Image: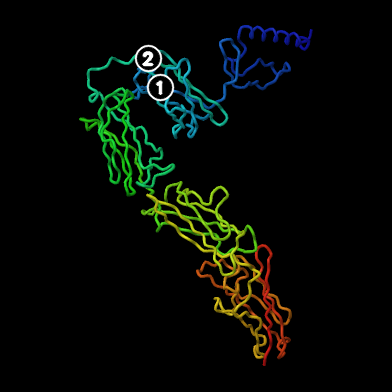
Amino acid sequence: MSFKSLRPLAWVGTAVLSLALAACGGGGGGGGGGGFVLPAAWGGSATAQTTPATSTGSSGTTSPTPAATASATLDVRGGTGASTTSLTALEIGQAVAVVKDASGNPVSGTIVKFAEIGGSLLTISPAAATALTDASGRATVEIRAASVSSLGATTITAAATVGTTPVAAQKSIAISSAPAASAVSPQLAAKAINFLDTNPADKSIVIKGAGGNGRSESATLRFRIVDANNSPVKGVLVNFAVNGTGVTLNVPTATSDTDGVVVTTVSSGSVATVVVVQATVNGSNAVTTQSDQLTVTTGTATQAGFDLSATKYNLNYRQSGDKSTITVRIADANGNPVADGVPVVFTSDFLAVGSSSRGGCVTAGGLCTVDLVVQDPRPADGQYVTVTASTRVGSGTSISKAVRFTANDVSLVSLYTGPTAASTTQVTAFTVSAAQCNTVQVLSLFAGTPAAFPPPAGTAVSVTSSNPTLTAALGSQATIDDVLSDPRVRTRVDLRFTPTTASCTVGATSLVDVSFTAGNGIKSTSTIAVTTVP
């Protein structure tokens, strides 16, 4: 038998050996990457076989290493700030969650939802049981026993979402009985004062007399008295003081309740200011704290700070719906915008002002707006549209301001020699001497109504010549600007004429049309005869 004829037997032997090694857990190269390889001379490969990185379990099977993912951890801290697995029924603790992404970096700005499972032994504050992670990925809520009889074990959970990946963590704690009441007086048991909150929540009140819907002239401030374990202390006498001027402290002393909470209030005065309220345990100046800053600002409206403006002052009489937006801005005596919610009413002798829901507006950010809309009743030429805005302050004193508009009919617009009503002469002719041939001539005229009101704002002006040998053009803008001058006057329009040799014949007359077109297409045209004289 030749050596080649033994090759199949070698294959069989190899297979049997491989199966035996597998059955014994061998042949795997330590569970790593090598398999049994035939020598090259026997038809095998000379290159080693490899397999992906795996982990081997106790059963001898392998599985891929799991990929990194986002995570959350949860810890409970007692009144001393140390990590704990138990709280007393009077202790105030914290649940602290830390959220990280798949790379192990803290995730900020993520909402973490806290909950209790396995019992109803805890109260979580805030009531929404949610908190936002900070730059360290940390979110914290306050936890405490629901009552002194809420004893036993419970579990706290924290859940969040990182991108689209939900993460969660939990920790179990025990709630034990509160230690027996100490013979130490509440004043001595008090070790710290924690500022809780201010109402209004934005820590801002308005100057005395500026109150109203949504505006408060007083603020309520709450503090909590705690012992060395951060447990609330009942019956502690606390003194309050105001650091600053311009407000009245309404409650100079208070005694803490069963939750260790004391409350005081302050009222605004007549000046804008910033103050803080200090709380001190009576008889122990070392146990003290202060509130966040409280701002007193935004007094009542003043006549000097009552301002009116508009987007357009000369409206188009012929265009129903043409409008101007009127803005009222109101400041108090200190130059601060008045509080939101100040009502302002408007009246107008022509057209329509305000909205269908109200004739006025209510301030937000110190201002509010209404529209003045063109409709009947419309004024005659020379009649102003007077809009008056007003509000009441203090005990009912009214302050107001008026602004005047025009609603002009473009069909009445012509060219006059002067800007005022005293200039009643319409310009219909213009003479050019033969000696001025091929020289630009400028004619300054005034466009407006017989009562000397200007054309509506935005009116387009165009010039055309009936004689191609006489060029005519505008020497000023091609659109009538909005005019605020009071009293109103006609608008100056400059025309440029250039007679050429062909039109310089003495006695020759060329017609030049000056047209005024309003936004809705209504048009008027003034024709000027340009005559050449010796």
In the depicted view, which residue is nearer to us: 1 or 62?
A: 62
Please report contact status of discs 2 and 1: CB closer than 8 Å, yes or no: no
Q: Secondary structure at mark 1?
A: strand
* Nearer the camera: disc 2 or disc 1: 2
Query: Which of the numbered marks, if any, corresponds to residue 134?
Result: none
In the depicted view, which residue is nearer to us: 125 or 384?
A: 384
Q: Secondary structure at mark 2?
A: loop
Near mark 2 (Cα within 10 A), the count class, few <14, some 14-19 or many ≥20, is some
Which label's residue is closer to the chain start, 2 or 1?
1
Q: Which residue is mark 2?
A: 149
| Image location of residue 458, percent across then percent down | 61, 65
Q: Tally the numbered discs.
A: 2
Given the image, on which type of amino acid does mark 2 rest? Ser
Given the image, on which type of amino acid does mark 1 rest? Val
Please give left or right for residue 392 compared with residue 288 in the image: right
Q: Which residue is mark 1?
A: 76
What's the distance in space between the residues labelled 2 and 1, CA to CA? 20 Å
In the depicted view, which residue is nearer to us: 286 or 220?
A: 220
What residue is rendered at 46% in x and 30% in y?
Answer: 131
In the depicted view, which residue is nearer to us: 506 or 428?
A: 428
Look at the image and tell me in which quarter the N terminus lies: top right
Please give left or right for residue 216 compared with residue 54 in the image: left
Q: Is residue 64 above or below residue 419?
A: above
